[in-house]
Image (tube, rainbow, N blue to C red):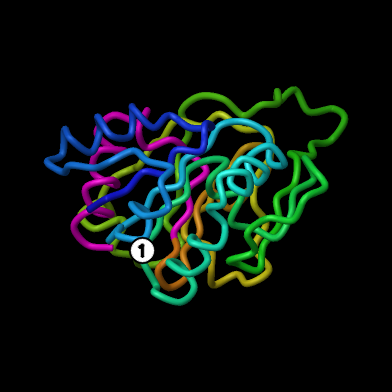
Amino acid sequence: MITIIDYGMGNVGSIKNMLKKVGYNSIITSQISEIKNATKLILPGVGSFDNGIKQLSDLDLIDVLNEKILNEKTPIMGICLGMQLMTKNSDEGKLSGLGWLNAKTIRFNFNQDSSLKIPHMGWNSIKIEKKSKIFQDMYAQENRFYFVHSYHVVCDNQEDILTSTFYGYNFASGFERDNIVGVQFHPEKSHKFGMQLLKNFAENF
């Protein structure tokens, strides 16, 4: 069962609907017992880093997530803030992240003469940096996804970078290590590209 973690900070309904469109049922839950039984997990997120970690902590979800991800190796996808929460920390707050990858989250930092606005918002292309089951049948096309974010992830290990995107400079718009995948963009808002990516996560990852 694909389990979408509801900690009050994500487009959970949109993700569930998109999964249904590609033929997969899912549940939305914050119940520890249901998360323990999950075969695949999605950690969505919109909002601030510290608030996201606090919400997970207040719901007593951090221990069960660590068990599922680090010990049981349950596949998980982090979306937007969900991806950022998987890093060690963020410029946006003071609390420690989940720390599943050697990575941190920083604010976009452009030259003073840059006309680029923060947040980075709208459609943008991604470059796939390494082969992954999450992008099966997607290599022969330009893949475009919808972004809304002011912060982005910096990976200590370059081999963890799954995709990159250019907005003023190249940044890691996706990472993957073992059973963990994170995407900065919103597949649930990205039409056919998002549908294919979620289908691949459900079928192959």
Residue shown at the point (22%, 62%) measured from the top left: 204
Q: Quadrant of residue 108?
A: top right
Viewer-proximal residue, 99 or 148? 99
The number of numbered badges drawn on the structure is 1
Q: In this view, does 167 lie above or below 65?
A: above
Residue shown at the point (80%, 45%) measured from the top left: 91
Q: Is residue 61 above or below residue 8?
A: below
Disc 1 residue type (three-letter): Pro
Residue at the far left in the pictured view? 23
**Residue 92 place in picture, x, y as percent:** 77, 40
Magenta stretch contains residue 177? no
**Residue 142 place in picture, x, y as percent:** 34, 42
Residue shown at the point (74%, 55%) measured from the top left: 89
Q: In this view, does 184 lie above or below 123?
A: below
Q: Quadrant of residue 30?
A: top left
Viewer-proximal residue, 82 or 127? 82
Q: What is the magenta segment's predominant secondary structure?
A: helix
Magenta stretch contains residue 200? yes
Q: In this view, does 141 lie to the left or right of 183?
A: left
**Residue 171 place in picture, x, y as percent:** 62, 49
10 Å crowding of disc 1: few (<14), some (14-19), many (20+): many
Residue shown at the point (44%, 59%) measured from the top left: 181
Q: Is residue 170 left or right of residue 66?
A: right
Q: Is residue 142 left or right of residue 21?
A: right
Q: Which image quadrant: the C terminus?
A: bottom left
**Residue 177 place in picture, x, y as percent:** 47, 70
Give the SS element for disc 1.
loop
Q: Specify start and end residues of the magenta stretch as a single range.
A: 181-205
Residue at the far bottom in the pictured view? 71
Viewer-proximal residue, 146 or 92? 92
Dot 1 corresponds to which residue? Answer: 75
Viewer-proximal residue, 4 or 114? 4
